Image: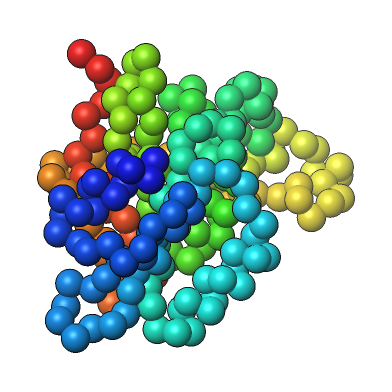
Amino acid sequence: MLDVTLSHIETAGYKINSANEDEITILSKIENNNRKLHLFLHSQKTNRKIFVHEINEILHSGDYISNIFYKDGENFHVRLGRRAHVKGNERSLKRYTNQDLQKMLHLRDLEKFALGQNSPQTTLTYYQPETQRLAEGFRSYNMGNVILNYEHIPQGDRRFDFVREKVADDYKIAQEITKQRKNIRFSPRKKGSKILIVNAPKYAGKKA
């Protein structure tokens, strides 16, 4: 993950200040601008409290942050899978098609934190390792809200707060964003923000 990310960053014309398995520090392209971009590479579970503290210190210093997650299906980009179809069988996800259910993810704490910071943008970017079927690369996804519906529960039995129609806290529908972009780029979540979104280059997709 580190080597491929470094290669893409350098190809895009950015200068590397430092790098390790968890973080790449990138220098600004603007002359006399000492602010750096801290690109975090999430390949394993990390203590959220410690990570949040580190992020806050970086932002307080005036530097920028961004995130890439390892798409392993275990720590990050975890599909709801069988649970989605169980909940979709006349239960809380019954309004969704099988195609939607197949795209549903159960976000982990760091993904939810990063997505919350990226607001109003709804994009998360992942490193796709090479598999027998897929090429190595980066993939960005729009994380759409999932609405839980409890019409199947009789009105008199809806005694608890969670038994109401609402946006799911942990579930998102991941819709891949396809761009013809040649190089990796970073853009602010909104004008003036120090939180940057990773704009992935074109992904090769399935192997020939």
Question: Observer-nearest residue: 148 or 26?
Answer: 26
The spot of residue 154 in percent (x, y) is: 80, 38
Q: Locate residue 175: give its quadrant.
A: top left
Q: Nearer the viewer, residue 73 or 172?
A: 73
Q: Is residue 197 left or right of residue 178?
A: right
Q: Position of residue 41 (x, y in %)?
A: 45, 51
Question: Does residue 206 appear left or right of residue 161 in this picture?
Answer: left
Q: Nearer the viewer, residue 176 or 92?
A: 176
Above or below for 143 versus 85? below
Does residue 189 sit above or below 32 in this rendering? above
| Picture coordinates of residue 140, whole percent (x, y) | 33, 44
- Give the x, y percent position of residue 49: 67, 65
- Total numbered circles: 0
If the image is split into quadrants, where does the C terminus sit? top left
Compared to residue 189, the image places residue 183 above or below, namely above
Q: Residue at x 33, y 74 (%)?
A: 36
Q: How is the image coloured?
A: rainbow
Q: Is residue 203 left or right of residue 74?
A: left
User: Residue at position x 38%, y 20% from top?
Assistant: 131
Which quarter of the figure is the N terminus placed in? top left
Q: Say if residue 108 shows up in the picture.
A: yes
Judge left or right: residue 150 versus residue 121. right
Q: Say above or below: 169 vs 66.
A: above
Residue displayed at 54% across by 76% down? 56
Instruction: Tell me, yes or no, if residue 120 can be seen here.
Output: no
Residue under the image location 84 percent in, 51 percent down: 160
